[in-house]
Image (cartoon, rainbow, N blue to C red):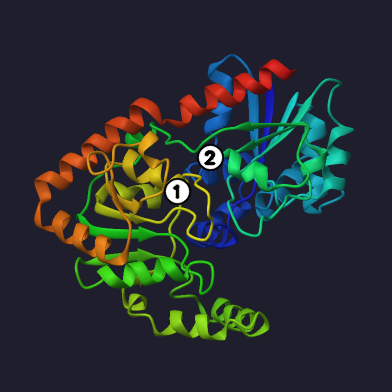
Amino acid sequence: MRLLHVTTYPQDLLGWHYRRTPELARSPYQAQHDSLLALLYVWSDFIVAKVRRLGGSGAVVVANDVRAQEQWAREHGLRETGSDAIVLAQIREMRPDVLFFQDSYSFSAAFVREARRLLPKGSLISAYTGLASVPPRMPEMLPELDVLAVAGWPIAEQFPVRARETIVMGHGFEASILDRVPASGPRIPAAFIGQMGPTLHGPRRELLETVADTVPLTLYSGTLRAKPKAALRQFAAAVVRRKLAAHLAVLRSPLRRQARPPIYGAEMYAVLRRADITFNQQGGNVPFYVPNIRLFEATGCGSCIVTDARAGVEKLFEPDTEIVTYRSKEDLREKVQWLTDHPRERAAIAAAGQRRVLKDHTLDGRLDGLLGELQSRL
């Protein structure tokens, strides 16, 4: 199998990375690319590494890393320097038999059709989505795909139009993180990492506000303490969408005092490895259950995760033995207090959850299923 993994990274992560390494933008493409993958963001090069272990070949393209992509274009004498043109040139050069879009929302159907013309006969185009939302957000590329991989069947069942075939690949934890990211440093009593938007994440903010005076809580979220330009955009969006009251609730939230900038990849894993408790809320606005990736990242890193009780979570973890679940604000507050007062029991739950992840929920195991499904269709 020759697999080309096409993805995108958050713009604030890209900006932060190049600001802290200003000389990097003048480096060759491969140096820039390797430096970015070393951040270990989401799937990084884990899929490609798995393909190589199985005897195949592969590469990763971070399509919106403008500096590195334009450097690739210069090194290859490419006159067209638009983002799509560069990615198409990379597809043309590699001619993969599996073109895999981790980000299924940033590329148009027309782009996918153009990409198909560059692939060898019999190749597959696949994409992934783990986004659970109501109303559903359907990828424009969906009808052009041969295979769509989803984090859970309820996501696929939302789409009125589907790919030719749909398969399930749940989230998992990349076990090599434990060797690559140290657990050194001061302990963090409780952490939350994620978005805290005024409308979509209102219930999440309210839940965390109920425990903020129970345990020292550190939040890593770009929406609670946005920079001036981002804050202005958030305010304008709230006015246009008539959600000003929800926006003002965020501005008045006591959580803002505990908020820090967002963290990703290795920096995030380092926090999770030092966090005694990690808070989680899975798909707060959807009636169905699709386990989110943080459930596996936090438990895999050895943190005691406290997550909402959703029907089906017991098939993944044993509640109150491997993870801790809550059903209400009052239940959350009571359990956080108990975990704070019983550090030995809390550590035992965290250790049991980590063992379960490393046994049943690794990314390597999930990829066995995904790559096997793709290989069988070539």
Work out whether residue 78 can be spotted: no
In this rendered view, identify the residue nearer to me: 45 or 294.
Answer: 294
Question: Where, quadrant-wise, is the C terminus in this rendering?
Answer: top right
- Disc 2 is placed on an element classified as loop
Q: Which mark is residue 190?
A: none
- Disc 1 is placed on an element classified as helix
Circles 2, 1 touching at the beta carbon (< 8 Å): yes
Residue occupying the point 57% across, 76% down: 230
Residue occupying the point 49% across, 75% down: 226
Q: Position of residue 111 (x, y in %)?
A: 84, 45
Tell me if residue 69 comes above or below residue 351 in the rendering.
Answer: below
Q: Position of residue 279 (x, y in %)?
A: 33, 56
Q: Position of residue 161 (x, y in %)?
A: 78, 44
Tell me if residue 52 comes above or below residue 24 in the rendering.
Answer: above
Left or right: 245, with 340 as reference point: right
Q: Label 2: how many residues lie within 10 Å, few (<14), some (14-19) or many (20+)? A: some
Question: Where, quadrant-wise, is the N terminus in this rendering?
Answer: top right
Tell me if residue 48 comes above or below residue 294 in the rendering.
Answer: above
Left or right: 187, with 203 as reference point: left
User: Identity of the amino acid at label 2?
Assistant: Ser
Query: Which of the 4 image quadrants contains residue 123?
Result: top right
Residue occupying the point 63% across, 83% down: 242
Q: Position of residue 105 (x, y in %)?
A: 70, 51
In this rendered view, identify the residue nearer to me: 221 or 196.
Answer: 196
User: Identity of the amino acid at label 1?
Assistant: Gly
Residue occupying the point 47% across, 64% down: 195
Find the distance from the CA under tag 2 to the CA under tag 1.
Answer: 9 Å
* Residue position marked by numbered label 1 in the rendering: 265
* Residue position marked by numbered label 2 in the rendering: 44
